[in-house]
Image: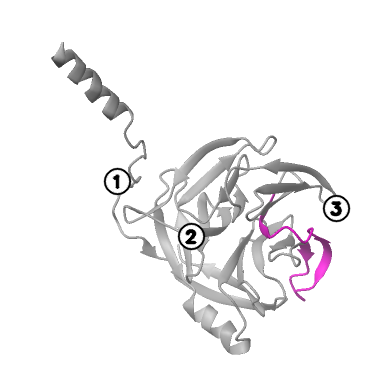
Amino acid sequence: MKNLLYLFLLAVVFSCGDDTKPPVTDTDSTAPKVLTYSLINTFPHDTSSYTQGLLIYKGAMYEGTGLEGHSKLMKVDLKTGKALQKIDLDAEYFGEGVTILNDTIYQLTWRSKVVFVYTMDFKKVKEFRIGTEGWGLTTNGKELIASDGSSNLYYYDPTTFQLLRTQAVTEAGSLSYNLNELEFFDGFIYANQYQQPYIFKIDPGSGAIVAKADLTDAWNRVKVIDPVADVPNGIAYDADTKKIYITGKLWPELYEVQFSK
């Protein structure tokens, strides 16, 4: 009887233990390749824009900005950096990542955990709640892909914003961190790393960072022009011209760049 009681108590101990899952690591511990880039063109960027989301859709540039009381969604003239169209978020919201899928605009908010949905003429038609902070947002053409400042990417249904799956992102076999603004093109997810000068090139199949660009030179350049310039944040890809653009929070310039293969 004592033996049976012991086995029962042992089972209870194990069943009630910490159910925290061990860190997810990628089986490939290979360090990311160096992703070099060339600066092709320079354009003006509004230094009041705390850039949180950047994209090009059907030839037009769109930008989402942050900070409470200053958050906006804008359609921007690439050549002048000026807003062609904009909508201000209510002062309580800190705007975050932006993407467009099937002529529908999606904009995250930071700690409010609210997603705004707009028509192409910036009319808000829906709001969704999510279970994490909102940081970066992009799309693979079918799903919405979001970051929350951790090592995770979250895949959502664009119609219901139901969470479909979560993917851990790894660098050389260890979990990454501070995944921020996102862009999907040529079969890969590109992500700024918040507070760092890096852009990651992520394999969406494995979550592994396969290449890594260092934007230190561009960051130093804009700080010389305007010391208030903050961290790099913003990656946009023009599917028609195959051009890539980068900028940062409060940056005075936006750059067309070309990444190495």
Front label number (2 vs 3): 2
* Tag count: 3
Q: Secondary structure at mark 1?
A: loop
- Residue carrying label 2: 178
Q: Secondary structure at mark 2?
A: loop
Quick one: label 1, few (<14), some, or many (20+) residues within 10 Å?
Answer: few
Q: Residue at x 62, y 83 (%)?
A: 228
Is 111 included in the stretch rendered in magenta? no
- Residue carrying label 1: 27
Is 85 included in the stretch rendered in magenta? yes
Left/right of residue 22 with respect to residue 93 in the rendered view? left
The first of marks 2 and 1 along the sequence is 1
Q: Residue at x 75, y 67 (%)?
A: 70
The image's mark for residue 192 is: none
Q: Position of residue 24 (x, y in %)?
A: 35, 45
Q: Secondary structure at mark 3?
A: loop
| Residue type of the residue flagged with mark 1 | Thr
| Residue type of the residue flagged with mark 3 | Asp
Q: Are dots 1 and 3 in contact, CB under 8 Å?
A: no
Left/right of residue 6 with respect to residue 94 in the rendered view? left
Q: Which residues are magenta?
A: 74-100
Give the camera-side residue of 5 and 176: 5
| Residue type of the residue flagged with mark 2 | Asn
- Residue carrying label 3: 121
